[in-house]
Image (tube, grey):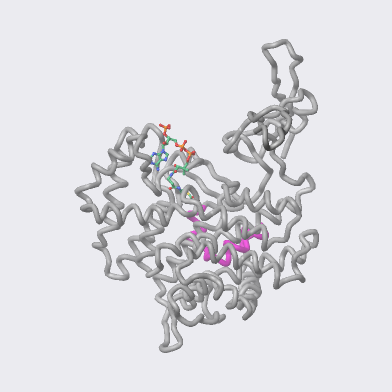
């Protein structure tokens, strides 16, 4: 972060002295006004619920240009990463800042695959859950529980501990998600097969049974890998900020990632792909494409409380680049599985077309986000709808841990402690219970 030549001057209409605030440049993107000394200088806080104009940290990992519809991981466009690299290379890039060469990739993949198994005790945690538990409820519990198994890697001040926790989390998430799935359908857990790719191994643990051989379909494997890559990081979104805030107290990485999983669950965030598919199924039940117009009227009516799920984004005010790539994958998967005429896909295309031409959406710059198509792909692969968000969590784990490790390595990092504008009662005295 570079100090700019100019300063920001904050003046007050009541005659209080104005204050100069330093301005910093990043490498790209908006400058920031440094308000850290504002309270000491003026006795005032700033007010920005939802962080609409507040940078909570400096970061060198992911950059989004919402107006251009651009997403860069460590400077590389998501389109190039999704077409030229796989998820393991992307993980290496996010964690260490560079794309590995062939030997580096082999070495990194080997390190990850060495940690794919989870402690057998994990099965007993699962048994405590109802069979119909939501996979995100299970994942929140299981990820938090990992901290009870790896006492040798919970010291966040130790870079080696941070690195081994990162590898363990990336390696074990697919195993845990697949276990959560197998538990809910009552099938035996499948142990990881380390000769498979990261995505192939996940498909194996999800869909193989001990009864017969399971052969990974390369089109589905590629689609799964792309889903992981597209969801791997997204700068300071709600769950990543949760991980940073949780980790800022010095808690262990497994606990901080469990907090991220909990945050991701919400329908305004990771839960949107599940909500989007449920929405498409509802419209399909109501009559399909012929009901799209009626549904859109509800979406535009503020009193209806209905939103077009999979549309809109806090940062992208142009097409979400991940949505384009996911639409491509969607066509490829449906083609490979002979589902080109899938009614939900057709419905999604019809909704998208109408929304992109409708004034309501155009004026508000609402475009499809990645979740609009990722649900259709996952459903075609055979992944049950409630598991979608858990798969998002699996993919985002590398981003969370890279951001957490970046924060801990930042000399300016402090425990996160937002302020407030108090609107409650002023001091008052407690009355004896008989007089209340
Ligand atoms: N359907 C209908 N109207 C919408 C939608 C939508 N999906 N999204 C935003 N709007 C409207 C809002 O009502 C608001 O209208 P107004 O100005 O008339 O009041 C305007 O567009 C601006 O929207 P905000 O809610 O202020 O935008 P914000 O940045 O706070 O929210 C969010 C972004 C939460 C993603 C929102 O667009 C949304 O709820 N979308 C649906 C859920 C979804 O798909 N989430 C996935 C996000 S991507 C991810 O997590 C991977």
Would residue 387 appear left or right of 235 to someone viewing this image? left
Number of dots carrying numbers: 0
Of residues 362 and 120, the one nearer the viewer is: 120
x 73%, y 30%: residue = 429
Place of residue 431 in the rendered image (x, y in percent of width and height, measured from the top left): 71, 32
On-image quarter of the C terminus: top right
x 40%, y 49%: residue = 310
On screen, residue 31 above or below 241: above
On screen, residue 179 above or below 244: below
Would residue 11 appear left or right of 274 to someone viewing this image? right
Indicate whether residue 188 is drawn in magenta. Answer: no
Give the quadrant of residue 23.
top right
Would residue 247 appear left or right of 215 to someone viewing this image? right
On screen, residue 105 above or below 3: below
On screen, residue 341 above or below 299: below
Of residues 407 and 243, the one nearer the viewer is: 243
Place of residue 120 in the rendered image (x, y in percent of width and height, measured from the top left): 62, 81
Main secondary structure along the magenta-highlighted residues: helix
x 70%, y 70%: residue = 148
Place of residue 222 in the rendered image (x, y in percent of width and height, measured from the top left): 44, 68
Of residues 253 and 342, the one nearer the viewer is: 253
- Considering every residue shown, the one lying at the far front of the view is 434
On-image quarter of the N terminus: top right
Give the quadrant of residue 400.
bottom right
x 75%, y 68%: residue = 153
Magenta range: 78-99
Ligand 1, seen in the image, is in the quarter at top left
Give the quadrant of residue 185.
bottom left
- Considering every residue shown, the one lying at the far bottom of the view is 211
């Amino acid at each position: 972060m570079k100090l700019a030549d100019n300063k920001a001057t904050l003046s007050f209409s009541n005659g209080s002295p104005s204050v100069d605030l330093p301005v910093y440049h990043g490498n790209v993107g908006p400058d920031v006004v440094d308000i850290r000394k504002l309270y000491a200088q003026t006795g005032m806080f700033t007010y920005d619920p939802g962080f609409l104009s507040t940078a909570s940290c400096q970061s060198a990992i992911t950059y989004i240009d919402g107006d251009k519809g651009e997403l860069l991981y460590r400077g590389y466009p998501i389109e190039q990463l999704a077409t030229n690299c796989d998820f393991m290379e992307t993980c290496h890039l996010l964690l260490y800042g560079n794309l590995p060469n062939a030997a580096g990739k082999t070495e990194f993949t080997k390190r990850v695959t060495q940690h794919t198994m989870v402690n057998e005790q994990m099965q007993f945690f699962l048994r405590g859950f109802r069979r119909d538990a939501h996979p995100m409820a299970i994942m929140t519990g299981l990820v938090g529980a990992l901290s009870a198994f790896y006492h040798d890697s919970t010291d966040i001040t130790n870079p080696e501990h941070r690195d081994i926790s990162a590898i363990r989390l990336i390696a074990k998430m697919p195993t845990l998600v697949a276990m959560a799935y197998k538990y809910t359908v009552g099938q035996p857990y499948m142990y990881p097969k380390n000769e498979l790719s990261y995505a192939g191994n996940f498909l194996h643990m999800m869909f193989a049974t001990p009864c017969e051989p399971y052969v990974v379909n390369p089109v589905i494997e590629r689609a799964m890998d792309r889903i992981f890559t597209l969801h791997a990081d997204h700068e300071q979104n709600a769950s990543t900020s949760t991980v940073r805030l949780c980790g800022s107290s010095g808690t262990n990485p497994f606990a901080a990632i469990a907090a991220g999983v909990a945050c991701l669950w919400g329908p305004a965030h990771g839960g949107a792909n599940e909500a989007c598919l449920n929405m498409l199924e509802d419209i399909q039940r109501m009559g399909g494409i012929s009901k799209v117009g009626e549904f859109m009227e509800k979406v535009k009516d503020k009193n209806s409380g209905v939103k077009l799920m999979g549309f809109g984004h806090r940062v992208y005010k142009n097409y979400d680049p991940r949505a384009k790539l996911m639409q491509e994958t969607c066509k490829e998967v449906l083609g490979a599985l002979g589902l080109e005429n899938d009614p939900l896909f057709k419905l999604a295309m019809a909704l998208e077309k109408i929304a992109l031409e409708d004034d309501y959406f155009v004026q508000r710059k609402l475009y499809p986000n990645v979740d609009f198509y990722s649900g259709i792909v996952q459903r075609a692969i055979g992944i049950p709808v409630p598991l979608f968000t858990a798969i998002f969590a699996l993919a985002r784990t590398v981003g969370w841990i890279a951001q957490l490790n970046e924060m801990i390595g930042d000399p300016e990092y402090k425990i996160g402690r937002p302020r407030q504008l108090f609107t409650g009662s002023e001091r008052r005295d407690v009355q004896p219970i008989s007089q209340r």
